[in-house]
Amino acid sequence: MTNLSDTTEFKMTNISEAFLHHLWKFRLFRQDQLKSNTGQDIEVVHPGIHNHHGGPDFMNARLRIDGTLWWGHVEIHVRSSDWHRHGHVGDEHYHNVILHVVVENDREVYLQQPNDLPVLELKNYIPWNFWEQYRAWIHTCQWIPCEKECKTMEELQWISWKDRLLAERLQHRVEHILIELERTKGNWAQITFRELARAFGFKSNAAAMELLAESIPYHIIARHHTDPMQIEALLFGQSGLLQTDHKDSYPKSLEREYWILQHKYGLRPISRAAWNFGRVRPQNTPAIRIAQLAAALSSSDHLASTLLHSNTDQLQRWLQQEVNPYWKTHHDFDRPTALPSHCRLGNKSIDNIIINAACKLQFAFGKFHDDQRMIERALANFELLDAEENSIIANWRKLGILANHAGDSQALIQLYNVYCTNEKCLNCVVGNKVLNFKDT
């Protein structure tokens, strides 16, 4: 069997620490006659717990070194000199390291005095074909490296992996909400308004919608929610879309109403330049989405309660609001459409808003209040919604990996965006199953 140390093809710049972490974690190296740099016998009783945060790479490992059982941490580098390069010298977090695992021992490293930190030079125990297989696999020209193998994973494994991915995606997506809640001492009203507005912006104008919501304290919206005209005036005025001379009577009425409200509350509109008008369908123009948001706000007595405590059927009915009749014949101010339209949100758009606002807020609420029932409710609601349709989900479908509901589609989006595109195959359940590095 050829090891890394035996081949002249090997170049140190090719190898990664992630690859070494994987080998150590699953002990995918020859474990017979392991020797340290000073000739000590090494037996890996337990490799330790993989640490993804600051400090040594593997915590609480159990090693038998020259017959003595040691408990402590393991640090892994490509070269031993990386210990200095990564700033571990003098760092107290590394004082309990009992083994330094490297591919190449190119510099002496010690904790307090020479030879007090055993070094295992792993290149003598890694089969060369392991690295060749991994490198060839992740550098494939396919959409994802495991295109040919991912369907071989059992359905129960896929279900479990998708559940984990959904929870992981939600945890990442609510981090900013939890930080904001801490800062505002639990101001759910404003945060709910912001998240709902962002969801109404969809992909093309999410950021602009968020700016719009942040420019209006929600208590002002709540005070005027029974008057749809005033809600429309507040939203359109703050959007910057009323800052031109209009011809139609409807925008002129909004201008008059907004002028009163603006001076009453000291409001400052955002810039019209924040909005994306290019390459959007008529039903997805900023004006139409703002009108739809206004209709939803006008029909909710308590916005946070509506999004946090309504079931999916109730949310779907709530979002099917009729907009101001003006928008049935226009897609922007003073720009009539060729054919009349009802201008209500479509079913897929409604589900998209529930996914990106209601379910996310429910999950955040559960995390913030340590309410497991709300967390489970948020996760369960994903299963009641249709899977999203986009290029990522379409490509998974071509590979035979189906999204049966919105939870699945969110999970597969997470898998592709976080793992596949970043070559984190060694952290993926599918990648681990395929890359078992059988020595052939």
Image: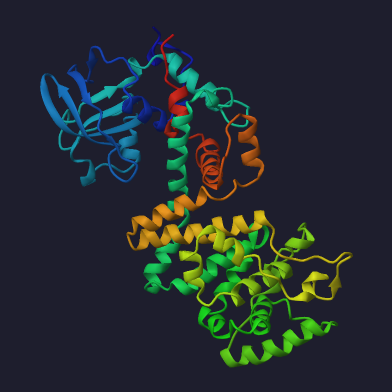
From this view, report whether residue 230 is shown above or below residue 386.
Answer: below
Q: Position of residue 62 (x, y in %)?
A: 18, 29
In the image, is 262 to the left or to the right of 310? Answer: right
Which residue sits furthest right?
A: 338
In the image, is 378 to the left or to the right of 82? Answer: right
Which residue sits furthest top?
A: 1
Viewer-side residue, 387 vs 267: 387
| Residue at left offset 43%, top offset 57% | 363
From this view, report whether residue 100 is shown above or below residue 385.
Answer: above
Q: Position of residue 142 (x, y in %)?
A: 63, 28
Query: Which image quadrant is residue 349 in?
Result: bottom right
| Residue at left offset 20%, top offset 19% | 43
Q: Quadrant of the N terminus?
A: top left
Viewer-side residue, 237 vs 253: 253
From this view, report whether residue 351 is shown above or below residue 88.
Answer: below
Q: Quadrant of the C terminus?
A: top left
In the image, is 291 to the left or to the right of 427? Answer: right
Viewer-side residue, 337 vs 28: 337
Q: Position of residue 6 (x, y in %)?
A: 40, 11
| Residue at left offset 64%, top offset 70% | 293
Q: Position of residue 48 (x, y in %)?
A: 25, 32
Viewer-side residue, 80 vs 350: 350
Q: Is residue 331 visible?
A: no
| Residue at left offset 14%, top offset 29% | 70
